[in-house]
Image (cartoon, rainbow, N blue to C red):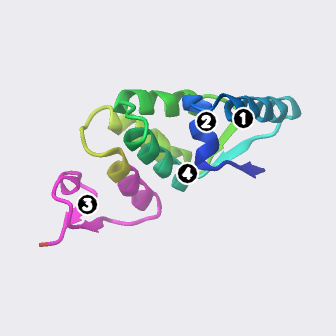
Amino acid sequence: MIGLDTNVIVRFLVRDDEKQAQSVYSRFKKAEMAGEQLCISLTVILETIWVLESAYGLSRDDILGSFETMRQMPLFEFKNGNVLDNLINEGRKTRLDLSDLLIAFSAQAAGCDSVLTFDKKASRLPLFELIM
């Protein structure tokens, strides 16, 4: 299996560099035709959220919609896909930062009871425990 870096996902979603975007689409098509799956880790998801929010100003709904669409594509293998599913579902119900939600659901999937934080906003989520 082949892993994907954040910049490949960003080119795929945003197409801000046409030459690179074409390279991505060509490689994805090749993988699809060969029956390959391309692996996307939670680290890449986290970095993609940050890039799409901060560098491209994409809305929360656009980001979640992009992940939801990609999640349905057989080409992609998401490591800990249940964590991404939780992010997509809960991300639409709350205004907490997507990155905080991903941290919480990743910790939960790893068997953690809670995540210690100084972030008062994040501590509104039951999986976070505020340190005073």
Locate residue 85, reporting x and y percent.
47, 39
- What amino acid does circle 1 point to? Val
- Disc 2 versus disc 3: nearer the observer: 2
Which mark sits nearer the N-terminus, 3 or 4? 4
CA separation, marks 1 and 2?
7 Å
Which residue is tagged 1? 24
Residue at x 66%, y 28% (from the top left corner)? 18
- What amino acid does circle 3 point to? Phe
Locate residue 96, reporting x and y percent.
25, 44
Residue at x 28%, y 33% (from the top left corner)? 93
Which residue is tagged 3? 128
Check disc 1 and report its element: helix, strand or loop. Answer: helix
- Disc 1 versus disc 3: nearer the observer: 1
- The magenta stretch is 102-131
- Disc 4 versus disc 1: nearer the observer: 1
What label does residue 44 carry, if any? Answer: 4
Which mark sits nearer the N-terminus, 4 or 1? 1
Residue at x 24%, y 38% (from the top left corner)? 95
- What amino acid does circle 4 point to? Val
Which mark sits nearer the N-terminus, 1 or 2? 2
Which residue is tagged 2? 11
- Disc 2 versus disc 4: nearer the observer: 2
Q: Residue furthest left?
A: 132
